[in-house]
Amino acid sequence: MSISSSRSGIVFDIREFTLHDGPGVRTTVFLKGCPLTCTWCHNPEGMSRRPQLVRSAGGDRLVGRRYEAGELAGLLLAQAEILRANEGGVTFSGGEPLAQAPFVAAVIDRMSGVHVVLDTSGYGGRRAFLSLAERADLVLFDVKLVDPAAHARWTGRANRLILRNLDLLTELGRPFVVRVPLVPGVTDTPENLKAIAAIVSGRASLVRVELLPYNRAAGGKYAACGMTFAPGFDESRPVDADTTPFAEAGIEATVV
């Protein structure tokens, strides 16, 4: 049986009153399952498509709940008034929302009048990507590494689909923010940041670039999920949050 259909999908968290997942005050829905295996992932409980047992000092808990599209939309619509009053809305994140695109699209279709943000790695099929990007008011689009071999090494996948979807997003004209997770010695190198500036430069619907400092607390989640944290890079190395390559390309860039 498919994990996700247009009728139901698996969510591993719903966080209310988030402030960094798009404009205003938002509710962020975290979809379970991701095709990438980034060695620095700070949501390891979102990697697997299926519910999983997470162990902690407070006891064991099952992470991942199946929602019907109408059920989840109803829950989110109950918060719509307060979200609108705070110039916010709902953000779909993950994991990777594209992995459950029919379900996410069905939820969005039931939320007329709610500002929607798609927070995506960009890794997914053309149909899945367009089905969600066309429904979103704003897209938060990760660009981690430009070099295909480096991208495959650190995320488990080449970046061909991601760069293609970035082009599709540009053609669509939907406003988008490029987000760059700053991983010490991996994504924060001068060469990579210059390459990212070069590929996003001149895209009319680009709002800005956001540089996201590395989260050193991420590794602590892995043992609870029954996983091993093996980042393959020096976590103690200071992150280089250099916005200069973007400024030189005429692109607004901020460190979040």
Image (spheres, rainbow, N blue to C red):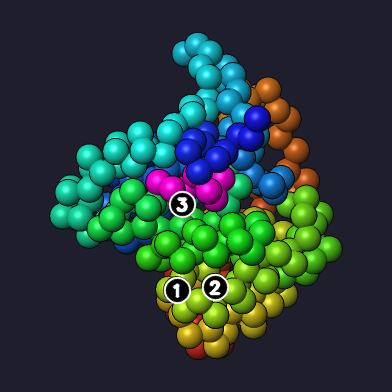
Position in image of residue 125 (x %, y %): 66, 59
Q: Position of residue 141 (x, y in %)?
A: 54, 64
**How many numbered callouts?**
3
Q: Is residue 161 left or right of residue 80?
A: right
In what element is the residue under mark 3?
helix
In which quadrant of the rendered image does the C terminus lie? bottom left
Label 2: few (<14), some or many (≥20) within 10 Å? many
Disc 3 crowd rating (10 Å Cα; few below 14, some 14-19, many 20+) is many
Marks 3 and 2, the one that precedes in the sequence: 3
Q: In the rendered image, which quarter is residue 56 located in?
A: top right
The magenta-colored residue range is 100-107
| Residue 128 pos. (x, y %) | 59, 57
Residue under pointer 3:
105
Q: Which mark is residue 169?
A: 2
Which amino acid type is marked by label 3?
A: Ala
Q: Is residue 89 left or right of residue 182?
A: left
User: Amino acid under label 2?
Assistant: Leu
Mark pair 3, 2: CA separation = 17 Å
The residue beneath circle 1 is 174
